[in-house]
Image: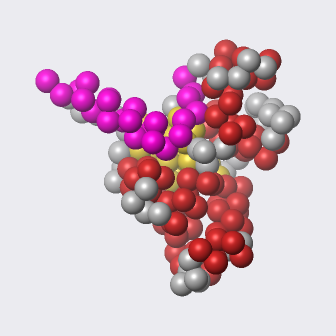
Protein backbone atom coordinates (compact mmCIF):
# COMPACT_ATOMS: atom_id res chain seq x y z
CA UNK A 1 0.00 0.00 0.00
CA UNK A 2 1.33 3.44 -0.93
CA UNK A 3 1.44 5.94 1.89
CA UNK A 4 0.44 9.50 1.03
CA UNK A 5 2.51 12.29 2.56
CA UNK A 6 1.23 14.07 5.63
CA UNK A 7 0.51 17.80 5.32
CA UNK A 8 2.01 19.87 8.13
CA UNK A 9 2.91 23.39 9.14
CA UNK A 10 5.98 23.75 11.30
CA UNK A 11 6.03 26.70 13.66
CA UNK A 12 9.14 28.88 13.61
CA UNK A 13 10.35 27.31 16.86
CA UNK A 14 10.55 23.91 15.14
CA UNK A 15 12.85 25.24 12.43
CA UNK A 16 15.07 26.99 14.97
CA UNK A 17 15.26 23.88 17.15
CA UNK A 18 16.05 21.75 14.09
CA UNK A 19 19.05 23.96 13.41
CA UNK A 20 20.17 23.98 17.06
CA UNK A 21 19.72 20.22 17.54
CA UNK A 22 19.42 18.32 14.24
CA UNK A 23 19.15 14.95 16.01
CA UNK A 24 16.32 16.06 18.33
CA UNK A 25 12.61 15.64 17.66
CA UNK A 26 12.34 18.92 15.74
CA UNK A 27 15.33 17.92 13.61
CA UNK A 28 13.68 14.58 12.88
CA UNK A 29 10.49 16.39 11.83
CA UNK A 30 12.56 18.58 9.51
CA UNK A 31 14.20 15.44 8.07
CA UNK A 32 10.76 13.97 7.31
CA UNK A 33 9.94 17.06 5.26
CA UNK A 34 13.34 16.91 3.59
CA UNK A 35 12.70 13.26 2.67
CA UNK A 36 9.26 14.09 1.22
CA UNK A 37 7.42 12.01 3.78
CA UNK A 38 5.83 15.19 5.12
CA UNK A 39 4.68 18.05 2.92
CA UNK A 40 5.68 21.16 4.83
CA UNK A 41 3.91 24.44 4.14
CA UNK A 42 5.42 27.80 5.01
CA UNK A 43 4.81 31.47 4.36
CA UNK A 44 6.89 34.60 3.90
CA UNK A 45 5.97 35.63 7.45
CA UNK A 46 7.32 32.37 8.86
CA UNK A 47 10.53 32.74 6.84
CA UNK A 48 11.01 36.30 8.17
CA UNK A 49 10.47 35.10 11.73
CA UNK A 50 12.95 32.23 11.32
CA UNK A 51 15.60 34.66 10.05
CA UNK A 52 14.92 37.10 12.87
CA UNK A 53 15.01 34.46 15.61
CA UNK A 54 18.14 32.71 14.33
CA UNK A 55 20.07 35.97 14.28
CA UNK A 56 19.12 36.95 17.84
CA UNK A 57 22.08 37.31 20.21
CA UNK A 58 21.00 34.46 22.55
CA UNK A 59 20.77 32.04 19.61
CA UNK A 60 24.11 33.18 18.23
CA UNK A 61 25.62 32.76 21.71
CA UNK A 62 24.50 29.09 21.71
CA UNK A 63 26.08 28.59 18.30
CA UNK A 64 29.11 30.89 18.11
CA UNK A 65 30.11 29.35 14.78
CA UNK A 66 26.74 30.26 13.22
CA UNK A 67 27.02 32.99 10.61
CA UNK A 68 24.43 34.95 8.68
CA UNK A 69 25.53 32.99 5.59
CA UNK A 70 24.67 29.71 7.35
CA UNK A 71 21.33 31.15 8.49
CA UNK A 72 20.54 32.10 4.90
CA UNK A 73 21.57 28.62 3.73
CA UNK A 74 19.24 27.05 6.29
CA UNK A 75 16.40 29.40 5.31
CA UNK A 76 17.00 28.45 1.66
CA UNK A 77 16.72 24.79 2.67
CA UNK A 78 13.41 25.51 4.43
CA UNK A 79 12.11 27.20 1.30
CA UNK A 80 13.36 24.33 -0.87
CA UNK A 81 11.67 21.57 1.14
CA UNK A 82 8.46 23.51 1.79
CA UNK A 83 5.50 24.58 -0.25
CA UNK A 84 5.55 28.38 -0.03
CA UNK A 85 2.05 29.81 0.35
CA UNK A 86 1.99 33.35 -1.00
CA UNK A 87 -1.30 34.60 0.43
CA UNK A 88 -2.60 33.57 3.81
CA UNK A 89 -6.06 35.03 4.38
CA UNK A 90 -7.14 35.69 7.95
CA UNK A 91 -9.72 33.08 8.90
CA UNK A 92 -9.13 32.46 12.60
CA UNK A 93 -8.44 34.99 15.33
CA UNK A 94 -6.38 34.16 18.39
CA UNK A 95 -6.75 37.17 20.66
CA UNK A 96 -4.47 35.80 23.38
CA UNK A 97 -1.53 35.62 20.93
CA UNK A 98 -2.24 37.33 17.58
CA UNK A 99 1.29 36.52 16.35
CA UNK A 100 0.27 32.84 16.23
CA UNK A 101 -2.64 33.55 13.88
CA UNK A 102 -0.36 33.34 10.84
CA UNK A 103 0.53 29.72 11.67
CA UNK A 104 -3.11 28.74 12.22
CA UNK A 105 -4.32 30.53 9.11
CA UNK A 106 -1.51 29.02 7.02
CA UNK A 107 -2.54 25.53 8.16
CA UNK A 108 -6.18 26.29 7.37
CA UNK A 109 -5.32 27.71 3.94
CA UNK A 110 -3.31 24.65 2.87
CA UNK A 111 -5.62 22.13 4.55
CA UNK A 112 -2.82 20.81 6.74
CA UNK A 113 -3.43 17.91 9.06
CA UNK A 114 -0.97 19.11 11.69
CA UNK A 115 0.64 22.16 13.19
CA UNK A 116 3.88 21.08 14.86
CA UNK A 117 4.97 23.41 17.64
CA UNK A 118 6.07 23.86 21.23
CA UNK A 119 4.04 27.07 21.56
CA UNK A 120 1.71 26.76 24.54
CA UNK A 121 -0.92 29.12 23.15
CA UNK A 122 -1.23 26.97 20.04
CA UNK A 123 -1.11 23.65 21.90
CA UNK A 124 -3.80 24.85 24.32
CA UNK A 125 -6.27 25.12 21.44
CA UNK A 126 -6.44 21.32 21.43
CA UNK A 127 -7.34 20.96 25.10
CA UNK A 128 -8.56 24.36 26.30
CA UNK A 129 -12.04 24.89 27.73
CA UNK A 130 -12.28 28.53 26.65
CA UNK A 131 -14.63 29.47 23.82
CA UNK A 132 -11.78 30.14 21.35
CA UNK A 133 -10.39 26.62 21.84
CA UNK A 134 -13.83 25.03 21.52
CA UNK A 135 -14.55 27.04 18.37
CA UNK A 136 -11.22 26.03 16.87
CA UNK A 137 -11.78 22.33 17.47
CA UNK A 138 -15.35 22.53 16.16
CA UNK A 139 -14.45 24.44 12.98
CA UNK A 140 -11.21 22.65 12.13
CA UNK A 141 -11.69 19.07 13.23
CA UNK A 142 -9.08 17.69 10.82
CA UNK A 143 -6.31 20.02 12.05
CA UNK A 144 -4.34 18.82 15.08
CA UNK A 145 -1.75 20.85 16.96
CA UNK A 146 1.00 18.67 18.39
CA UNK A 147 4.51 18.70 19.84
CA UNK A 148 7.30 17.33 17.63
CA UNK A 149 7.65 14.13 19.66
CA UNK A 150 3.89 13.50 19.38
CA UNK A 151 4.03 14.13 15.63
CA UNK A 152 6.82 11.57 15.25
CA UNK A 153 4.83 9.06 17.33
CA UNK A 154 1.69 9.58 15.21
CA UNK A 155 3.62 9.00 11.98
CA UNK A 156 5.33 5.92 13.41
CA UNK A 157 1.95 4.46 14.41
CA UNK A 158 0.56 5.17 10.93
CA UNK A 159 3.47 3.25 9.41
CA UNK A 160 2.81 0.27 11.67
CA UNK A 161 -0.86 0.21 10.72
CA UNK A 162 0.05 0.03 7.02
CA UNK A 163 2.22 -3.07 7.39
CA UNK A 164 0.59 -6.45 6.75
The answer to if 16 sits in the magenta stretch is no
- Determine the residue positioned at 38% across, 36% down: 153
Q: Position of residue 147 (x, y in %)?
A: 53, 40
Q: How is the rendered protein coloured?
A: secondary structure
Question: Camera-side residue: 40 or 55?
Answer: 55
Residue at the (66%, 44%) spot, across then down: 119
Depicted 76 relative to depicted 70: above or below:
above
Quadrant for the N terminus, please: top left
Q: Residue 67, relative to residue 157: is it above or below?
A: below
Indicate whether 23 appears above or below 94: below
The mark total stands at 0
Magenta segment range?
142-164
Provide residue 45's location: percent of width, then percent of height.
Answer: 71, 55
Q: Is residue 151 part of the magenta span, yes or no?
A: yes
Viewer-side residue, 23 vs 70: 23
Q: Which image quarter is the C terminus in?
A: top left
> In this rendering, would 6 be left or right of 54?
left
Q: In the image, residue 25 lies at what x, y percent?
A: 44, 50
Residue drawn where x is 48% and y is 52% of the image: 26
The image quarter in which residue 109 lies: top right
- Name the main secondary structure of what is drawn in magenta: helix
User: In the drawing, does residue 116 fall left or right of residue 106?
Assistant: left
Judging depth in this view, the residue of 46 and 89 nearest the camera is 46
Q: Which residue lies most toward the left here? A: 164
The residue drawn where x is 74% and y is 18% is 129
Q: Residue furthest right?
A: 95
One can see residue 27 in this view: yes
| 34 with respect to 101 (left or right) | left
Is residue 51 visible in the rendered image? The answer is: no
Residue 72 position, x and y percent, is 58, 75
Amino acid sequence: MVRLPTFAVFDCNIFVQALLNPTGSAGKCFDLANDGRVVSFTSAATIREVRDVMLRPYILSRLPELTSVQVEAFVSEIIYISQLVEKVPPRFRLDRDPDDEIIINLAIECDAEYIVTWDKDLLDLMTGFDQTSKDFRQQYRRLKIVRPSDFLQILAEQDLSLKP
